[in-house]
Image: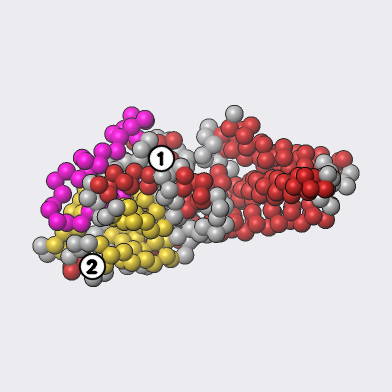
Amino acid sequence: MFHLVTGLPWLIVLVRFILPLPWPWTLKAVVAVVLLIASQYHYVSRLSSGSVFAPEFPRPLVIAFNVLFGAIVLLAVFQIALDAGALVGLVFTGYFSEPAAEVRYAAGIAALALSSFGVSRAIIVPPLKDIEISIPGLAAAFDGYRIVQLTDLHISRLFPAAWTGSMVAKANALDADLIVITGDFIDGSLEHRRADVEPLRGLSARDGIYAISGNHEYFFDAGAFLEHFEAMDMRLLSNSHAVIERGSDKLVIAGVPDRSAGRNGFPAPDLEAALQGVPDAAPVILLDHQPMMAQQAAVSGVALQLSGHTHGGMIRGMDRLLARANNGFVSGLYQVGSMQLYVNNGTALWPGFALRLGRPAELTRITLRQTR
């Protein structure tokens, strides 16, 4: 069914874009077949690895599939818009006006150009995004405390060892007090990703590296991956917390596993357990991959929640749809009751639809400030 759904944009492009063009039938057939193969990118991924989430073929081919798949989706949207305009014209004039060939060419070029640009923006090591967040009750010793948040790394054939190493070097250069990783480390099996994740061992911050699981870990062998990351000097927070101290002052970093953990034989997220025994009056920063349960965290006294998962919506406009699936939270800083929620656009994203238009990736440095 999934592969039939991804074929629908191709069908729209075939019937409403390719067939009406004044081309020889041979050329139409060649273009249609190439785009049909591109529309089945996820099926090809499943054939290569057993999973639609992990294409195991050369990176240039993964990039080409993403460009063509994105172009098909965008062109289908453009064609629907053209047809909607023609239908409006039909209502008022009684005549359905087919777009001129030149208009179709312009739509095709725009779709391919936008997709190429969007993929190029998706696969870079992201630029720094600096933000300051005021935390009620934050001790003076933690004023100016710097947290680098990495999330949705999706280390894969699209984001391989070279990308990971460059990202780690850039993160380390930010001189963070703490680095947190809020899930979705990988796409693929540990056997395939072992070399690609190895540069993460080089992450360095004064108070260490803390992490939680994301939903993509549970598409593969989550137990093996989480054990591997702990062996790489990361502290995995699973319904638990750590206390950072500066003299007598304290800051709590708590974490829960992804909501899909319980469905895969792992402990389900339990915020009450994660907060059990936290020091009185110490502000709590919660790591939770998905932002949708922010209201519960706010009621529980969390000061700041850091999340990812949404990739910022990837495309401006489409982000509104993803917000509806995440209780309205999709990108940036939100006030949820007395708590603040930061939803990170992601350091990378899923290689199955690696396209960003108006929702850039980010390497995020959060500076904590006392409430003035």
Precedes in sequence: disc 1 or disc 2: 1
Left or right: 225, with 351 as reference point: left
Q: Residue at x 79, y 52 (%)?
A: 104
Q: Residue at x 26, y 67 (%)?
A: 369
Left or right: 162, with 29 as reference point: left
| Residue 284 painted magenta | yes
Q: Colour scheme in the image?
A: secondary structure
Q: Nearer the viewer, residue 158 or 305?
A: 305
Please identify the quarter of the rendering in which residue 90 is found: top right
Q: How many marks?
A: 2
- Residue 294's disc number: none
User: Quadrant location of the N terminus?
Assistant: top right
What whole-number distance in Å separates the C-alpha atoms at marks 1 and 2?
33 Å
Dot 1: what SS? helix
Q: Nearer the viewer, residue 24 or 137?
A: 137
Q: Is residue 278 visible?
A: yes
Q: Residue at x 33, y 47 (%)?
A: 294
Looking at the rendering, the stretch of residues picked out in magenta corresponds to: 261-288
Left or right: 158, with 67 as reference point: left
Q: Is residue 263 above or below residue 108?
A: above
Kind of residue at badge 1: Asn
User: Quadrant location of the C terminus?
Assistant: bottom left
Q: Nearer the viewer, residue 236 or 367?
A: 367
Dot 2: what SS? strand
Q: Is residue 372 above or below residue 185?
A: below
Residue 145 screen position, x and y as percent: 26, 66
For mark 2, what is the residue? 370
Residue 151 screen position, x and y as percent: 40, 52
For mark 1, what is the residue? 215
Residue 364 screen position, x and y as percent: 39, 61
Q: Residues within 10 Å of mark 1 (few under 14, many from 20)?
A: many
